[in-house]
Amino acid sequence: MADEHLSPLDLAFWNLDSPGHPMHLGAVAVFDRDPERPVDADGLAALLTARAEAVPRMRQRVKDVWYGVGGAAWAADEHFDARHHVHAVRRTDAWAAVAELMARPMDRHRPPWEVYVIEGAPDAPFRILVKLHHALADGLRAVEFGAALLDQGARMPAPSAPASANAAPRKGAEAAVPAQVRASGLHLPALPLPDPRQVVASLPERVREAGRALGIGSAVLRASLDPGGPAALGAAWTPGGAERRFATASLDVDDLHRVRKTSGGTVNDVVMAVVAGALRRWMEARGDDPAGPGPRALIPVARRRRRGVRGGRGNRISGYLLRLPVGEPDPLARLRDVRAGMDRNKDAGPDTGPGAVALLADSVPPLAHRFAAPLLAASARLLFDVLVTNVPMLDVPLTLDGCRMTELYPIAPLARGQSLAVACSTFRRRVHIGLLADAESLPDADTLAAALHGALAELLDACG
C-alpha cells in the first residue's frame, strides 16, 4: 500500500515543530448544558473516541521515507488507539486549561491530534478543545475534522480513505524495491518514473517558479531589514516549555457590517482595524507609547491545491504582510490605512511579497527542510510581529450528544519569538476571536481581549 507524501509546506510545518513552540492549531467549542442531565465528561470522551475512530486520516501518523531523503509520508499507525488521543479534563478555569493544553507538544510517534473534554464549574458550559498539527490540517480541513466529531457529522456516511493511501502498487513496483530493504521493514514508496516529454514541457513553468521564488526571497530579505513593531510585542526567546495565555472576544457581525457599509472595504478590513485599535488601547493601558512603526501582521491566505504536486492534499497557503496603523489615533483613519494596505496586497496578489514566504517551501528539497527549520523558526520575528488569521466555519446549528454549540474560538500556533497569534471565525452571527499569547511577554491577554470590544465601539461611534 502506497503512502501519501507530506506536501513541501506540511513537511516544513512538521520540521518547524519544537517542544517550546509546537506547530499545532486548535479550536475551542462551547456547548450549553442539557438541563435534564449533568455533564458526563467521561461519557463524552468515549463518544468522541468512537467517532474519531471512523475518520481515516486520524488513524495515520507521520513516517520518515527513504525516497526523497529527508521527506515524510502519512502512514497507517499499526498501534492506533483513539483512547490515547481523547481525554476528559476537570478545571474550574477552563481558559487556563486551554492555555496549558495548547502549550503541550504532541507525541510525534502517534497521529498528531488530541481532543479534550473540559468540564468547568458546575453551572458553566462545557468545552471541547481540538488540537491538530498544522502538518495534518489547515484551517478549512481542521473544520472538517471537527465536524466529523459532532452529531451532524456522525450521521453522514464515513468518509473514504484518501485514494493515495489505498492505491495498489504498480505492477512490478514491489520487485523494483531491493529485497534487503523489503526485509528490513523500512518504508520505501514506489513511484513511477516521469515521462521525459512531460519534464521538457514543464520547464517553462519551472523557470517561472524559480523567478517567483527569487522575488519572494528578495522581498523577505527586505522585510527582515525593516524595523519591527513596538517593543511591547517582543516575545522572550525561550528554548522550551514556554507558558501560554488564552483569551477570547466575541463581536457582533452586524456591527462589523455597519462599519463596512459606512466606510467601505471588507468585513476583514474592519476586523484588522479593530485589532489595530485594540493593540493601541492595550499599549496605552500598559503605559507604552503606540507611536512609531506599527507591528507587522502576517495574514494567511488560502490557495487552491495544484495538480501534480506530491502530497497535494496538504496545506497550500500564502500570506499578506500588513503594517498595522497602531500609531494612528483616529479610528476611521486607521481603517482607511488598513484598507489601503490590503488593497496593495491584493493588487500584487498572494504569490508575491514577503507574506508569500510559505510558497518557498515548494522550492526546497526535503532534506533541506530539516536543516533549515531551526533557522526559519528563529527568523520568524524578523518578518512579522503578530499573526492574524481568519478561519472559515460552517455557520449552521451544531450539537454534541444533543447539546447545542454556542461559541467556537479558533487558535493559531505561536511561532518562536512571537508573542501573539490572533484567530477569528464567524459562527452564528458572531465573530469569535481566540488570542494565544506568550505568558512572559503578554500576561494580560484578557486586557487585550477586552480592548477588542472597545476598539469596535470606537469605530461605531466614529461612524455615527
Image (cartoon, rainbow, N blue to C red):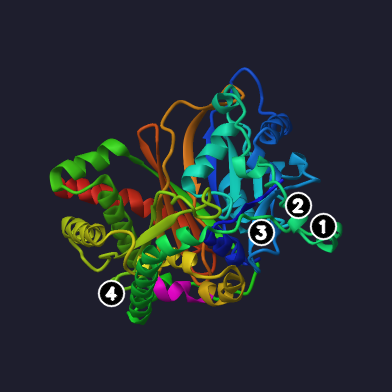
Other residues around mark 4 within 10 Å, as few (<14) / some (14–19) / many (≥20): some
Q: Residue at x 72, y 56 (%)?
A: 107
The mark nearer the N terminus, 4 or 3, is 3
Q: Are marks 3 and 1 in contact (CB under 8 Å)?
A: no
Q: Which residue is mark 1?
A: 182
Q: Nearer the viewer, mark 4 or mark 3?
A: 3
Q: Which residue is mark 2?
A: 174
Q: Does 436 sit above or below residue 144?
A: below
**Is mark 2 in CB contact (under 8 Å) with mark 3?**
no
Q: In x, y percent, where is residue 308?
A: 49, 52
Number of residues whose C-alpha sits closer than 10 Å to that of mark 2, classed few (under 14), some (14–19) or many (20 or more): some
Cα distance in 3D space between marks 2 and 3: 37 Å
Residue type of the residue flagged with mark 3: Pro
**Label 2 vs label 3, nearer the camera:** 2
**Amino acid at pointer 2:** Glu
Q: Magenta includes 193?
A: no
Nearer the observer: mark 3 or 1; the answer is 1
Is label 4 in contact with label 1 (beta carbons under 8 Å)?
no
Residue holding disc 3: 105
- For the residue carrying disc 3, how many other residues have a C-alpha within 10 Å: few (<14), some (14-19), or many (20+)? some
Amino acid on which the number 1 mark rests in the picture? Arg
In the rendered image, is residue 116 in sight?
no
Question: Mark 2 vs mark 3: which is more N-terminal?
Answer: 3
Sequence-first tag of 2 and 4: 2
Q: Is residue 59 shown left or right of residue 316?
A: right
The quadrant of the image that shows the N terminus is: top right
Q: Nearer the viewer, residue 67 or 257?
A: 67
Q: Which residues are magenta?
A: 378-383
Residue name at image x 60 percent, y 40 percent: 163
